[in-house]
Amino acid sequence: MTAPMPEPVRASLAESVNDQPHRAAVPSEFEFQVTHRDAQTKARRGWLQTPHGAVQTPVFMPVGTLGTVKGISQEELEQLGAQIILSNTYHLYLRPGEEVVRGIGGLHRFMAWNRAILTDSGGYQVFSMSALRKLTEQGVEFRSHLDGSLHHLTPERAMEIQAALGADIRMVLDECTEYPAGMVAARNSMERTLRWAGRSLVAWRKISEEGRETGPGLLFGIVQGGTFPELRKQCSEELVAMNFPGYAIGGLSVGEARPLTYELVAAAEQALPAERPRYVMGVGLPEELPHYVALGVDMMDCVLPTRNGRNGCLFTSQGRLHIRQVRFARDARPLDEECACRVCRRYSRAYLRHLFIAQEMLGKTLNSYHNLFFYLDTMRRIRETIAAGDFFRFLSDFPRRVQGEVP
């Protein structure tokens, strides 16, 4: 049975932020609406309108860190039905530099991509280089992994770079809590993230008011709090009090057990407003995607489809297939007989194994294409089952089928 249609929330994204004079106005080009809700879980279907088209949610975002999804052209991304991709502030700041991108007309024009783009703030990349950075209350001092040059990244600077890039969705600079971290360390990290979130919000407003953007963009706050549900809930509550247009949940899938990950997402989600988009950063495996959706998540991203593809791990409807295995050397079947992608319609397992063993570039491209299709098609099916009132069955069946190895 289909869940009842909710009251439209399309106006609330702008109105609830704009009704306070000291808050930044949400550009009129943006609109968020929930159209269907699942009766048995918190799953929901909707859309987020951006200046570069509407994004149907829940959505998976391919990762194009350097302004490119590795091994996949923009034409192929369009064929795959990618609605929005993710790029990284840290990497694009170092090379080619935000002023180069601004001079071309922004990241969309620079990379010839006329659909939506989300940019991470670069915080995760900086904090992952513990030997090359120094953390202060002001921000982060770090040395480039390219040439060792010294740089400073502050909440304000992260906003300036993302404004120059012109991303549709931008992220505050946050402190990524190390794993594992005790309660005191996690709380201190969360509190700094909250202070930086406030500074990011002020900078985003000022840049917008002064017309220093390549194009309009929404700003998302990021929930931190380590592996402590109570901190996750507190961080969400304090970010909501700041009234961001959208919210992300970061610092997950960094080594914790997956049941704990779901518990942390659920704790954060409890305090997040229903009328705003929710984004869980850096997740996940195919069998995990419907679980995040069931928790009320609208957006996800992960490098796994292309990274695993380049390394010969293919996701299929029957589980993972490691194409290097000798048992596929004479196998004339497609990767996945249930898959409608152009790789499965044309190429055999034997040929794809040959390409991988011979280290031919085409093999990495075809593998990545198939994996991206599998992820994006999974999200399409999730959206369809939510609308049809059949999501709970999908949630019960799909993860069991796709985890494990192909027999």
Image: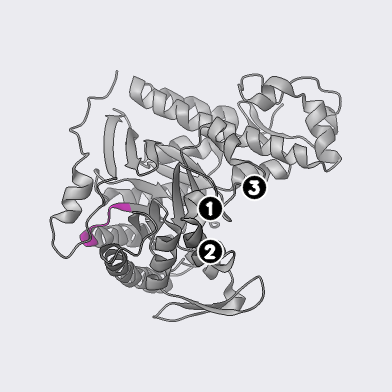
Marks 3 and 1: which is nearer the front? 1
Kindly identify which numbered label has been placed on residue 100. Answer: 2
Image quarter of residue 324: top right
Label 2 and label 1: CA atoms lie apart by 9 Å
Residue count near mark 1 (Cα–Cα under 10 Å), binned few <14, some 14–19, many ≥20: some
Question: How many residues crowd around disc 3 within 10 Å: few (fewer than 14), some, or many (20 or more)?
Answer: some
| Circle 2 SS class | helix
- The stretch of residues the image draws in magenta is 241-246
Residue 102 point in image, percent of width and height: 47, 61
Q: Residue under label 3, please give it.
A: 70
N-terminal of the pair, mark 3 or mark 2, is 3
Up-down relation of residue 299 to residue 187 (above or below):
above
Q: Amino acid at mark 3?
A: Lys
Residue 324 on the magenta span: no
Judged from the image, the secondary structure of the residue bearing numbered disc 1 is helix
Residue identified by numbered label 1: 110
**Residue at 45% across / 70% down in the picture?**
182
Do labels 2 and 1 touch, CB within 8 Å?
yes
Q: Quadrant of residue 341?
A: top right
Q: Is residue 130 above or below residue 245?
A: below
Q: Is residue 180 visible?
A: no
Q: Nearer the viewer, mark 3 or mark 2?
A: 2
Residue 103 placement (x, y as % from top left): 49, 61
Q: CA distance from mark 3 to mark 1?
A: 16 Å
The Cα–Cα distance between marks 3 and 2, rounded to whole angstroms, is 21 Å
Residue found at x 35% / y 71%: 196
Q: Position of residue 108 (x, y in %)?
A: 48, 49
- Give x and y (percent) for residue 236: 29, 57
Q: Secondary structure at mark 3?
A: loop
